[in-house]
Image (spheres, rainbow, N blue to C red):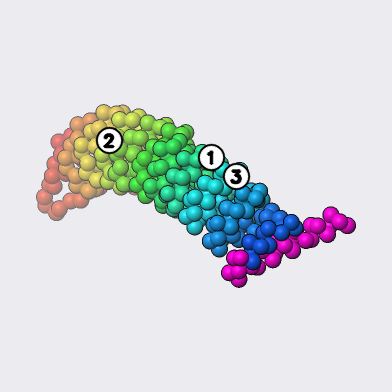
Amino acid sequence: MDTDAGSTRREDSAAEFVEALQKGLKKRALQISEHPDFDPDARDGLPLRVSVELGYTDIAARLLDAGADPNAAAGKSKSPIVLALENEYSDLAEHMLSNGAEISIRDQNGWTPLIWAAIKGRENVVEFLIDKGADIHVCSNDGWNAITGAFFKNHVKIVQLLTANGAKFGEKYREAALLSAYEHGSTEVVKSLISDGVSVNIGTSEGEPLLILAIARGDLAMLDLILSAGADVNIRDTKGNPALVSAIVNAQYAAAVQLVERGASVNVKGPKWAALHVAALNGRSDLCKILLEAGASIDHLGEGSYTALMLACQRQHVETVRLLLEHGADPNRKNAQGFTPYGIAPSILGKVTPTEAVLKEFGGR
């Protein structure tokens, strides 16, 4: 009974203290705090939290000196040290730390002061907490740590600051961070994540692989970085085209050459064509030559049993037609409809076109 009564008195005293502060009755609050029944830790440390929230830093300091627990609300509401930092009461925050405040205390969401500061973009607070030894790796309940929060909130300087102090992205969001970093041009973050072992064969929510994104942008430096980190050089885009075919389809010819140099299979087909087909269709004799020298099959059949030569003839790419014939393309092979390259090449009544002339030179009919 006595214990219950004492507890009730402490709860009531804390409530009176808080009410006095809320009404601006500072002297009354101080009087209450000096009463024997007053417990600064009652109601999960509410007196200290309210003192900080309302800007009564001197009273908060007195409560701490009187033994108030700065960690009384651990795992529940926002901690007193976060409230102090939020309001830029750095001296009070220092005082809390010297009175036992846990620098990496977690609230009900698992946020530490550092996670809070990083997400809110409070660079000076992040610096303060790091300097005081805050744990830069701890994650919130949903898997965010300080650098993850800063990155997804686009606080670039804080990301750089945390990275310089050895921060790593939380496991749950590392892949999403890699894709986001690439899409927003944060090359250093991409490099950091790759060096930390994040898979480079990941895809976007639409399923487009990181390698394909780099190809589509013609980002040769990133392409080299991704390939060096172990990306599948033959990975397919969402349309089913292998990376090499995708590069040529998107007219990223320098990327295509880089892929060939890094060992891409030159004969792997997409839904319709292999790389040589698309290069011939686009009249890229230079690329056709590179593909052939890398082992591309000259008469490889694509959609409708079309060869690269047939496609070059269809578009009247005379230089490409000659190159393919010089490399042994069959001038009389028939497609699924029974047409030879000569029959596929557009003709002009009463005239021999340049394409037809080259085909005839190599025995085409």
Q: Are marks 1 and 2 in contact (CB under 8 Å)?
A: no
Can residue 240 be seen at all in this image of the molecule? no
- Residue occupying the far right of the picture: 1
Q: Secondary structure at mark 3?
A: loop
Task: Give the magenta-colored segment's residue range.
Answer: 1-27
Q: Earlier in the sequence, mark 3 or mark 1?
A: 3
Quarter occupied by the N terminus: bottom right
**Tag nearer the camera, 1 or 2:** 1
Judging by the rendered image, the residue that carries numbered circle 2 is 257
Q: Which residue appears at 27% of the width and 35% of the height?
A: 257
Q: Are marks 3 and 2 in contact (CB under 8 Å)?
A: no
Which numbered disc covers residue 99?
3
Specify the label residue 177 is tagged with.
Answer: none
Q: Please state the horizontal and vertical placement of residue 208, each as a whole percent of the image.
A: 43, 47
Report x, y in % for residue 365: 21, 40
The reply to whether callout 3 and callout 1 are in contact (CB within 8 Å) is no
Q: Which of pointers 3 and 2 lies earlier in the amino acid sequence?
A: 3
Q: Amino acid at mark 2?
A: Val
Query: Which amino acid, mark 3?
Result: Asn
User: Three-letter amino acid code at disc 1?
Assistant: Asp
What's the distance in space between the residues labelled 3 and 1, CA to CA? 19 Å
Q: Residue at x 69, y 53 (%)?
A: 41
**Residue designated by label 1:** 135
From the viewer's perspective, is 193 left or right of 296? right
Name the element at disc 2: helix
- The x and y percentages for residue 28 are 64, 66
Q: Nearer the viewer, residue 78 or 62?
A: 62
| 9 magenta-colored | yes
Give the quadrant of residue 312: top left
